[in-house]
Amino acid sequence: MTINIPRGTQDILPGVSEHWQFIEQAAAELCRQYQYKEIRTPVFEHTELFERGVGDTTDIVQKEMYTFKDRGDRNLTLRPEGTASVVRSYVQHKMHGHAVQPVKLFYTGPMFRYERPQAGRFRQFVQFGVEAIGSDDPAIDAEVISLAMELYSRLGLKKIKLVLNSLGDTESRIAHKNALIEHFSPRIDEFCSDCQVRLDKNPLRILDCKKDRGHELIESAPSLKDYLNEESKDYFEKVKRYLDVMGISYELDPNLVRGLDYYNHTAFEIMSDAEGFGAITTLCGGGRYNGLTEEIGGPASPGIGFALSIERLMAALEAESVSLPVNEKVDCYFVAMGEAAKEKAVSLTYEARRKGLSAELDYLNRKMKGQFKAADRIHAANVVIIGEDELNAGKASVKNMDSGSQEEVPFENIIKYIEKA
């Protein structure tokens, strides 16, 4: 019986994995320039972390988490997102006491959500994200947004747009929450059971409901922007001004609320405008989460971050026909005829790799023609031919596969010759 991978997962095969590596390396280099340091957290955490951090009224917690009991009868969950884990680590390791503030972190790793698989959406998916914790300066909101936009730009995406909203501070959100409760309460029985539970806990989630999105009360619901106090308005204006001075264009969307409970003040999404990209256009989402560290048991430390799906990024690159400049060439392929020549080829291949060259040789005992075909398949730049005559002469024939030129090179000079070539 053949065993296949679980639904909603995928194998990243050679030929594609190199593109993933390119993206991950580009993201890491960009973070180095922005002074964000890598953090790696466990793939599973205590379930309570996500219930408290993400919010027990969210679809993620209510419907999508992979939760299990271990042999010690502890409730554990495969992480559905990255921010809660990073903030937990920030609190646990007392990073608020670090000399360099704010603490700027990035991560790349698999996340897990039980949802209906579709194009660009998987049950195991890979997120790249950044978190800046310890500052409530609107300028760092703009910095985080600019980092995400710059990554897409460097990778060659052009048909993207940035959408912004302000969710306001605690005072503004409470005023808006009360208005929403008053608005929905008389007809809440017309909404799904999830929304009925959300009414008192977090009515803002009703506006984001997938089942009831067409209901007339959602269309006429009080707008959050009408309940922003002066402090919240001023904060959002500063974020926009910083984006303006960086030359980053954006659109305002008062209905953008994001899917996690911990957001406040700045919320944003980056979307693809590429033709034929699909119904789900969001590539990246993030925002400010003042109060999350306290929720997880730490001191007050304001933060902001974003996360993007590598799978969605790959789909956007395909939609725009962007070809990543992945170097797939092999520097040299050693063709050996006979056992003595094979020993020399093994020695030279090892030496070439130690010098930082990519090198390969035949392991199937093919004839010379078959070895040349193999060299061509892996796009070898140079082929080094070693046979009995070459061994006797102390020289190998080196053929440049692009120009077709061929030259005899002493064995002791081959590595330097390939490096120059």
Image (tube, rainbow, N blue to C red):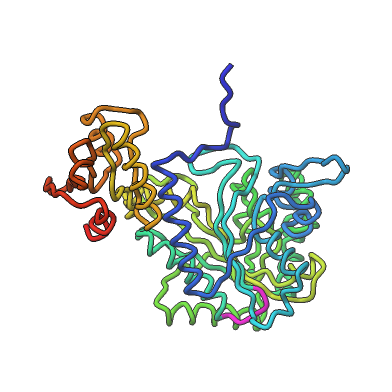
- Kindly identify the residue that appears in the image at 56 percent across and 20 percent down: 2
Query: Residue at the right extreme?
Result: 73
Q: Residue 264 lies in what quarter of the image? A: bottom right
Q: Nearer the viewer, residue 115 or 333?
A: 333
Please state if 224 lies on the left or on the right of 18 as rendered: right
- Kindly identify the residue that appears in the image at 62 percent across and 70 percent down: 304
Q: In which quadrant is the C terminus drawn? A: bottom left
Q: Nearer the viewer, residue 299 or 231?
A: 299
Q: In which quadrant is the N terminus drawn? A: top right
Residue 400 in percent (x, y) is at: 17, 48
Instruction: State whether the magenta stretch is mostly helix, strand or loop.
Output: loop
Query: Residue at the top extreme?
Result: 1
Q: Residue 378 lies in what quarter of the image? A: top left
Residue 291 in percent (x, y) is at: 74, 71
- Kindly identify the residue that appears in the image at 74 percent across and 63 percent down: 88
Magenta residue check for 134: yes
Count of numbered badges drawn on the protein = 0
Residue 6 in percent (x, y) is at: 60, 31
Vertical position of residue 347 compared to residue 92: above or below: above
Please state if 407 lies on the left or on the right of 185 as rendered: left
Residues in magenta?
A: 133-138
In this rendering, does residue 401 appear at all? Answer: no
Q: Nearer the viewer, residue 85 or 194?
A: 85
- Kindly identify the residue that appears in the image at 48 percent across and 41 percent down: 12
Q: Nearer the viewer, residue 392 or 250?
A: 392
Vertical position of residue 183 compared to residue 238: above or below: above
In this rendering, does residue 377 appear at all? Answer: yes
Please state if 190 lies on the left or on the right of 349 as rendered: right
Magenta residue check for 321: no
